[in-house]
Amino acid sequence: MTRSSKTWQVVALTAVAGLALAACGTTDTGDGASSDGACEGKIGVMGALSGANASIVLPSVDGAKLALKQWSAENEDCTIEIVDFDTEGDPAKATPVATKMATDDSFLGVIGGAFSGETRATKAIFGDAGLTMISQSATATDLTQEEPSPVFHRVVGYDDVQGAAIAKYLSDVVGAKKVFVIDNSDAYGEPLAAMVSKTLGDLVVASDKTQVAQTDFSPTISKIEQASPDAIMYGGYIAEAAPLLKQLRDAGIDTPFIGGDGLYGADFGKAAGSAGEGAIVTCPCVPIEDGTFKADFEAEYGDAPGAYAAEGFDAMSIFLDAFADGARTRAEIEDFVDNYDAEGLTKQLAFDENGDVAKENVVIWAYKVENGTLVPDQEISLG
């Protein structure tokens, strides 16, 4: 299955709501469609829905569910269902989940994987099944730039862009001259930290590797004490970043701390406690203030939109636009998504031949922990 170079101009969701969705033949395609071509099907969502990193994923799932609820209210002839699967972000747990969806013809699309490791482990399974993936938050560069899949798309920028932005923030905003870089040795943290180091060059005074599920960071802290950096960058997730930061502060190291979007979850501030105050977290996700999305989200869930909530809304909206346009099979949905071009909540959404949105549409924001909460700090200009 190849990507088409043709670009369809897709109208906004509110415009397609009134389209005739009864363009449903009685052909049995054998490609994930119902036998009568009815407007029905399942969109799977997989990611860390529990555990220490769940706050990075749950808001995006809520955003997707909000998009579906609003759309379904105006499209009563369609029966579209979201089915979520808790992988805990673990590639080993994601693999059987992917197989389950890939072999069940009622699934016509997947939002995810949410994390890069689980995405890397499952995209071949979905590719073999022709089941379209739209990730709201998997940012590892190699997912598209080194090993692209014909069915994988993402609505966020990749880590080479985010890594360059982190380096720019460290040099231009923090004014760091000696940076200590740490990564968690996994599919997300390691390449992100490597890009930061590559961009900073001689400004990196030392580096170290930690491990997923590590709890004692005294060896790394000793190296930091020896290097005496004026900034620390960490590539990894909340589960390890919070105790690392606590142990840094307990050791009397008050050096500015910055991490990537693996820390962009409500639980980071809670887990790090007072040690997290002032920490910077970057994300290729934007704070949404215009329109009704924020108010609608708060009304539905009782909280402001969190990590990747708007990106989850965007991912689901693309699938819903496909149904509204008459797509009923996996092949039709894949073709529609490949050629999608419309303004989303977060950016102009159109995918290149590798499944990425255009670099010029990617925005990286820095968020700061204040009173345990991540608040927008500033957009990081990549120009």
Image (cartoon, helix red, strand yellow):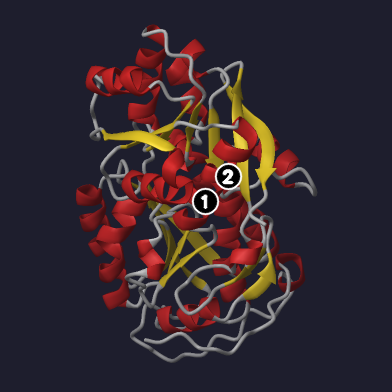
Element carrying mark 2: helix
Q: Looking at this rendering, what residue extends furthest in the front direction? A: 202
Q: Position of residue 371 (x, y in %)?
A: 61, 16
Label 2 and label 1: CA atoms lie apart by 6 Å
In front of the other: 352 or 91: 352
Q: Is residue 343 above or below residue 381?
A: below
Q: What kind of residue is marked 1?
A: Ala
Element carrying mark 1: helix
At label 1, counting other C-alpha atoms closer than 10 Å, the crowd grade (few under 14, some 14-19, many 20 or more) is: many
Q: What kind of residue is marked 2?
A: Lys
Q: Position of residue 34 (x, y in %)?
A: 41, 78
Q: Position of residue 71 (x, y in %)?
A: 65, 60
Is residue 307 something one can see in this rendering? no
Q: Give the labeled residue for mark 1.
A: 164
Which residue occupies 53% across, 58% down?
157
Badge number at residue 210 = none
Badge number at residue 168 = 2
Horizontal side, residue 235 vs residue 93: left or right: right
Q: Quadrant of the N terminus?
A: bottom left
Circles 2 and 1 in contact, beta carbons < 8 Å = yes
Using the rendered view, name the quadrant where residue 67 is placed.
bottom right
Q: Is residue 239 above or below residue 355?
A: above
Which residue occupies 41% across, 8% down?
252
Q: Is residue 99 above or below residue 240?
A: below
